[in-house]
Amino acid sequence: MKSWGKKAGLVFLAMHLVGIGVALFLETGLGSDSIGLLCDGIRHATGLQFGHASLLYNLVVILLALLAARTNMGLGTVIYALFSGYFIDFYSYLLAPLHLAEAAFGVRFALFAVGQCCLSLALALLIQMRLGMNALDAVLYRVNQAIRVPYAAMRTAIDLSYVVIGTLLGGTFGVGTVCSVLLTGTMVSFFTRQLSVVSVQTA
């Protein structure tokens, strides 16, 4: 029971980090990460709220993960799919009165960097602590196990395709999007290794 409670706590910590990270992307106006951009595009194309667009995307990907990568899924996968978009909506609501998009570029970029670190750490937490990866990472790690294509390379390729589709649907593309596409896979791998060291030292 104690172990389950700890896992649930870590999952919700990851959800808060995702919410803060993507909300900072959206509110600074520099362009979102690839999944955020895709969901933003879905929001513009359908008129849905961001949380509902994120839920729609996650349900499609989680179905794919159920078919192809069931062993990489867990509590975190389900919670991420159902609630991550609403955490983003919540933090966007809190940040909206600050009008971050009107701040100096240096301030906006620094906040974007904080958001990128939060998002990457959240994804690494779900992977390394075996809480159940988000559905996309569950599929990518299954492919990695099968054909040994590096995770960072696959993540970058998927991110690029999401950026193209999201932009075509009307999502906000910016310099932050480029940075996120180039950095997310590498940063998730970096944080995963660091968490691995920490878990070994505290075992």
Image (cartoon, rainbow, N blue to C red):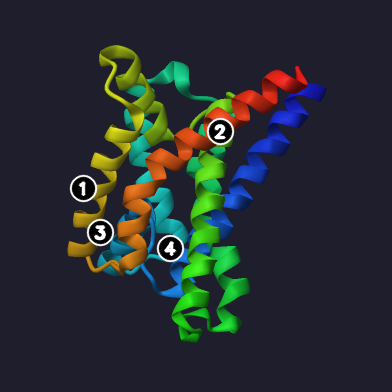
Alpha carbon distance from label 3 to label 4: 13 Å
Going from the N terminus, do you reach mark 1 or mark 4 first?
4
The circle on residue 54 is none
Label 3: which secondary element: helix
Instruction: Tell me what residue is drawn at x 25 percent, y 50 percent.
Output: 162
Q: Which residue is mark 3?
A: 166
Instruction: Tell me what residue is drawn at x 30 percent, y 56 percent.
Output: 38
Mark 3 and mark 4 residues within 8 Å of each other at the beta carbon: no
Q: Which residue is mark 1?
A: 161
Residue 90 falls in which quadrant of the image?
bottom right
Q: Amino acid at mark 4?
A: Phe
Label 1: which secondary element: helix
Q: Is residue 114 depicted above or below 14 in this figure?
A: below
Alpha carbon distance from label 2 to label 3: 25 Å
Alpha carbon distance from label 4 to label 2: 22 Å
Marks 4 and 2: which is nearer the front? 2
Q: Which residue is mark 2?
A: 126
Alpha carbon distance from label 1 to label 2: 23 Å
Q: Residue 101: where, in percent of width, then height?
A: 46, 81
